[in-house]
Amino acid sequence: MRSTKKSSIKHKLYMSQIALTVIVLISFFAISTTYFIIKTIKTTETNMRYSSDITVSNLVSYIDLMENYVHSASYSTDIATVLSDKDEQTIFDMQGNYTHISQTLNMILMSCNIPVSFTLYPTRGDIVIYDNLKTAPISKINTQAWFENLRINPNKFCYFTETEDDISYFCIVNTLYNPYNLSEPVGYLKISTEISHLIEILQNCVMENEESILLNEKGDVVFSLSGKEYGEEAIPAFSSISPNEPSSIKLDKKSFFASKSTQRGSRYSVIVLQSKDNIYKTIYFMCTILLGILILISMVSFVLVHRISGPIIKTLDELIIAMKMSNLGEFKTIDPRENGNNELDEAVNTYNNMVNSITRLVQYNNSYAETIKKHELSLLQMQIKPHFLYNTLDAIQHFAKENKPDDVVFLIRNLSKFYRISLHNKNDLVRLESEINHIKYYTAIENLKHNNAFTLKIDIPEAFMDYCIPKITLQPIVENAMYHGILEKENPVGTIILTAKDEGDYLYLYVTDDGVGISEDRMKEIFSETTQSVGIVNTDRRLKLFLGSECGITFESKENEYTCVTIKAKGVKLYDKDSDYR
């Protein structure tokens, strides 16, 4: 979560779109899979129910036909009368009776819609049937289980399966009784059909991979579609299946869906089994296909997301980069893009308007600052011009009247050099060497006017001479040291010392005089709004304006001993040697 909060907006946009796509696809996959599983199981159960119903209906119909045929063959002929006649008959009479029975049975067989055959088991061993009527002596079946059960529990019909010559048959036996003594069986008529015909019925009714099983009224397996023999352990599982209700059973450690159908009055029921493994394989296969389709859809979705979001994210990147550059002071507008996003276009237009406004404001501020610099410099120059120039001109006039041409020449030459530096240099920053020459000319003029009252000592390394400071920085401070320091002493003679040092990125200039000093109250007043020291205040402001707010002037003084003015400036060398006057 923390990494998500710290990620960029484009990553958040991509992640939100991908997360939305993934959530939708996963939800769709989960819902579709659940629905498909439920639907598949329901469909399987419905199909199995339908298969079992159709199967039991068709099988019962087939067996009903067999019952009808054997019943018709038993009672539409005189076969029971012929078998029960114990009077002696001529061979001619016996043959005529048996021929009639054989022809009648053959006619019944010809009218049958299903493939069946008849077998007669007379109880009298001396009876012989001709004309291809299949007969067998009673001795052939008296050891059969079905025959023994029939003797113990006489029923109208007896149902069983048997195998003869490797062919399995489904059989129904009708007991023939003596019409004159209904408790005396005189023979048994069996109708048989190959089980393969019944299996064809199962195959036509069941679905793919289904097993169909025919059970008798006792729950025993008569036969199965697969031909598999189910042992006694399967009988409880089959008995647990509720008719006409979907069920699940286990056989041989395998799970099956099961459906059981029976018809009212029928002796048989049909069970349809479907392996759960087959169903789950189908579900797995379909889910795999669905997953593949969803993966393909997700890939297409990601491509579409990238194509749709690409222009938006690119514009956002440009907007973010432009904002970062603006934070560094580089203001740059962004070209509008055809991204179809009105909100983003509005943000870009708003940013461009802001940049244009800031650019105009910066240009205005720069112009205003330049105007202020020139205005303050003009004020300083105006301050220098009146009293200094007038006093110097008065001194020149005085020396001229006293006929001192050398002094007049000296003053004019130094005054010319002084104003050449202060007035004709177009740059705001000048070399320290130029400023030192400026105060040398100024000191020379003032010494001539005040009988050499000032001694100027300069102790600055030559390496510092190329550093730059604002023009006319030292002159107001030196002038202040002369007039408010040295000349106010009882003996108006003193020394002004100029030193310098550099610390890190800054150059420190120290102007020290041995004048009367400055009281604490006076030092507080110098930088107040009511100060009369316009030259000092202007110099401090110009230092801050040109070199930064951390630069400026500070005072340290002790009354009647000294005053030290510290000038803090940037240690830079940005100057034009061709425009510096020396």
Image: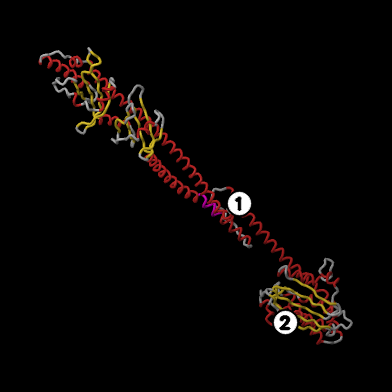
- Residue at image point 23% right, 22% down: 112
Q: Which residue is mark 2?
A: 460
Q: CA distance from mark 2 to mark 1?
A: 57 Å
Considering depth in this image, is 156 or 309 the residue closer to the camera? 156
What amino acid type is highlighted by mark number 2? Answer: Ile
Q: Against 22, is 445 above or below?
A: below
Secondary structure type for disc 1: helix
What amino acid type is highlighted by mark number 1? Answer: Ala
Tell me the tag on residue 347: 1
**Residue 178 included in the magenta stretch of the image:** no
Considering depth in this image, is 431 or 69 the residue closer to the camera? 69
Query: Which x, y percent locates residue 60?
Result: 31, 25
Considering depth in this image, is 557 or 26 the residue closer to the camera? 26
Q: Quadrant of residue 205?
A: top left
Disc 1: CA contacts within 10 A as few (<14), some (14-19) or many (>=20) = few
Secondary structure type for disc 2: loop
Q: Against 241, is 553 above or below?
A: below
Instruction: Give the main secondary structure, helix, strand or loop, of the magenta stretch.
Output: helix
N-terminal of the pair, mark 2 or mark 1, is 1
Query: Which x, y percent locates residue 249?
Result: 39, 36
Furthest residue to the right? 490
Where does the magenta region start and end? 308-315
Q: Quadrant of residue 187?
A: top left
